[in-house]
């Protein structure tokens, strides 16, 4: 079955045929032994897109065995240069099949084509190239150690792959977030088992075809589809053949995973939820702050972990800011991926729509002023069955309100006025989360001062989601454990072994 496009979920010539998303284990597309599968529906109109195989213990066992064999076989014997060259080929093949990846991700998430083409899919390819280059260029440490006999000792470190890495992924930027972990894990010489989100099986499956096409040895990249508890996700985290788990998703899922990994004492890297603040000072470049905040609230229909659902605006520009953001939010064009000019897609699923709408209802019940939105837009024809919600802005709530404290993961924000810098910092930090902040000001001293005081892993000043993959990425407090990016990814995906040579 390897290299059979229909096996990986690509639509056959007769359009509208249902897709079949199979596991990719040991270089082959396979069904579950137990014959279990689940439905994948379109976020845009809730039609059935296809069926996804649900993996169980046998599929996880098979993937771990394949991954271990790959580490002991040709993959383990490859030089860093050979591995890096192969990863460049993976990136090039993703680029050659750009249209297939864009189509698969659009079908799964319903998000605008332009965002796939300009950001999410190119980043998926870049994650392989950048980390292949990082691995080639990072030195290990060495020390000359004095000894009583005067001859001394040389200590040097070896960087070795950790082993089989379990990669558990969310649905909000499927290829980007999966390759952000698979790229460095493979560059460091590990083999991976990916458990994609049940909502987005497409691009992880397609990547199996890419791996085969460029000659990545079988068993290095494996995909086991399934759900979380009592399914592929849980079985992967509990498997004693898995050396480490890297996970992106909700904070409470992270808590469940850490319990399941504790028996085997496995290393974890967690990128979790957030409730990020945007701090907008009166001295900001107003137009740039509005443009950046529009992106940080509404990009990907608000389904970005780094997005800002809490805005704090200095009082002298509060009314002007609220009015400008309202006007821009009302000018967003909601619609399906392929439609020209669309910049707001649907939420990922009916279940997530229900969750977001429950927060819209809570905001109203708790006494919010609804500046705009708050409901479901009228969509034509079959689109009326999709997971759409209106872009929504609230004001007037106390800091104790649910929509200010809890992560919603939708196209919405609450805006609170503040009177001084200390007040803004206090409110920004008053959360259990600590992922990111965006600060908008033209006062350089203030920018640095505030950046040093906000309790988050990533602060943007006069920008948002501007990424350099060499920088440390991760969350403070309940937004994560550890850092990835650049050398920090190497720290997680390798073991450092010290060798002491008596001279
Ligand atoms: P989720 O936690 O519901 O699911 C993530 C993955 O975990 C899925 O593949 C799911 O099947 C799996 N899973 C669920 N329960 C499991 C279990 N018990 N054992 C093993 N696996 C299990 O998250 P989601 O809804 O897919 O994604 C949205 C969340 O992800 C938001 O909270 C968002 O903030 C967060 N996120 C964080 C970052 C970051 O970098 N910090 C990036 C993207 C998304
Ligand atoms: O840009 C990245 O590397 C990254 N991990 C982005 C996360 C986006 C969250 O939705």
Image (cartoon, helix red, strand yellow):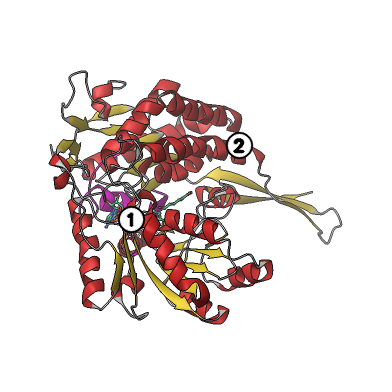
- For residue 460, say whether it is visible: yes
CB of residue at label 2: within 8 Å of ligand 2? Answer: no
Q: Which residue is mark 1?
A: 330
How many residues crowd mark 1 within 10 Å: few (<14), some (14–19), many (20+)?
some
On the image, the x and y values in percent for residue 258 come to 36, 62
Q: What stretch of residues is rendered in magenta?
A: 223-251
On the image, the x and y values in percent for residue 399 come to 37, 79
Q: Is residue 447 left or right of residue 221?
A: right
- In the image, 390 versus 460, the foreground residue is 390
In the depicted structure, whether residue 77 falls above or below residue 127: above
At numbered mark 2, what does the secondary structure look like: helix, strand or loop?
Answer: helix
On the image, the x and y values in percent for residue 182 come to 44, 41
Look at 35% across and 58% down and name the residue there: 261
Compute the Cα span from label 2 to label 1: 43 Å
On the image, the x and y values in percent for residue 473 come to 52, 55
- In the image, 440 versus 321, the foreground residue is 321
Q: Is residue 476 left or right of residue 448?
A: left
CB of residue at label 1: within 8 Å of ligand 2? Answer: no
- In the image, 149 versus 179, the foreground residue is 179
Look at 84% across and 53% down and name the residue there: 151
Q: Which residue is mark 2?
A: 133
Reply yes or no: does residue 228 show up in magenta: yes
Q: Is residue 27 left or right of residue 287?
A: left
Which quadrant is home to the N terminus? top left
At numbered mark 1, what does the secondary structure look like: helix, strand or loop?
Answer: helix
- For residue 26, say whether it is visible: no
The earlier-in-sequence mark between 2 and 1 is 2
**Eye-nearest disc, 2 or 1:** 1
In the depicted structure, whether residue 456 falls above or below residue 145: below
Furthest-top residue in view? 13
Count of marks, rendered view: 2
- Residue 281, quarter of picture: bottom right
């Amino acid at each position: 079955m390897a290299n059979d496009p229909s096996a990986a979920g690509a639509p056959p010539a007769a359009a509208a045929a249902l897709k079949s998303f199979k596991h990719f284990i040991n270089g082959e597309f396979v069904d579950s032994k137990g014959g279990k599968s689940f439905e994948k529906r379109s976020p845009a109109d809730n039609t059935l897109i296809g069926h996804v195989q649900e993996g169980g213990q046998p599929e996880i066992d098979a993937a771990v065995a394949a991954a271990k064999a790959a580490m002991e076989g040709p993959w383990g014997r490859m030089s860093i240069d050979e591995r890096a060259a192969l990863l460049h080929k993976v990136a090039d093949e993703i680029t050659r099949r750009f249209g297939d990846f864009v189509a698969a991700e659009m079908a799964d998430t319903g998000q605008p084509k332009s965002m796939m083409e300009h950001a999410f899919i190119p980043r998926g390819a870049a994650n392989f190239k950048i980390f292949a280059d990082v691995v080639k260029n990072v030195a290990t440490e060495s020390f000359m150690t004095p000894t009583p006999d005067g001859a001394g000792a040389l200590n040097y470190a070896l960087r070795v792959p950790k082993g089989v890495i379990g990669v558990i992924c969310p649905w909000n930027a499927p290829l980007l977030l999966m390759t952000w972990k698979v790229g460095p894990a493979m560059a460091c010489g590990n083999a991976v088992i990916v458990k994609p989100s049940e909502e987005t099986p497409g691009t992880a499956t397609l990547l199996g075809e890419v791996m085969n096409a460029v000659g990545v040895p079988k068993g290095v990249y494996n995909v086991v589809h399934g759900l979380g508890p009592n399914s592929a996700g849980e079985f992967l985290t509990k498997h004693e053949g898995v050396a480490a788990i890297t996970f992106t998703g909700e904070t409470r899922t992270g808590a469940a995973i850490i319990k399941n990994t504790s028996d085997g004492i496995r290393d974890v890297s967690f990128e979790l939820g957030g409730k990020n603040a945007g701090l907008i000072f009166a001295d900001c470049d107003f137009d740039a702050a509005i443009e950046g905040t529009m992106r940080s609230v509404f990009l990907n229909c608000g389904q970005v972990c780094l997005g800002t659902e809490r805005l704090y605006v200095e009082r002298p520009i509060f009314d002007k800011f609220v009015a400008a953001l309202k006007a821009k939010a009302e000018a967003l064009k909601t619609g399906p991926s392929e439609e020209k000019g669309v910049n707001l897609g649907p939420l990922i699923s009916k279940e997530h729509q229900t969750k977001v709408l429950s927060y819209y209802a809570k905001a109203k019940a708790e006494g919010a002023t609804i500046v705009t939105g708050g409901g479901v837009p009228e969509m034509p024809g079959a689109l009326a069955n999709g997971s759409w919600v209106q872009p929504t802005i609230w004001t007037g709530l106390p800091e104790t309100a649910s929509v200010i404290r809890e992560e919603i993961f939708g196209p919405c924000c609450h805006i609170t006025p503040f009177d001084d810098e200390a007040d803004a910092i206090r409110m920004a930090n008053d959360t259990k989360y600590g992922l990111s902040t965006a600060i908008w000001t033209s006062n350089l001293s203030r920018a640095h001062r505030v950046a040093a005081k906000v309790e988050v892993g990533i602060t943007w000043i006069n920008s948002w989601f501007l990424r350099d993959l060499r920088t440390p990425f991760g969350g403070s407090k309940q937004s994560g454990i550890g850092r990835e990016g650049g050398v920090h990814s190497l720290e997680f995906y390798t073991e450092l072994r010290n060798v002491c040579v008596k001279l």
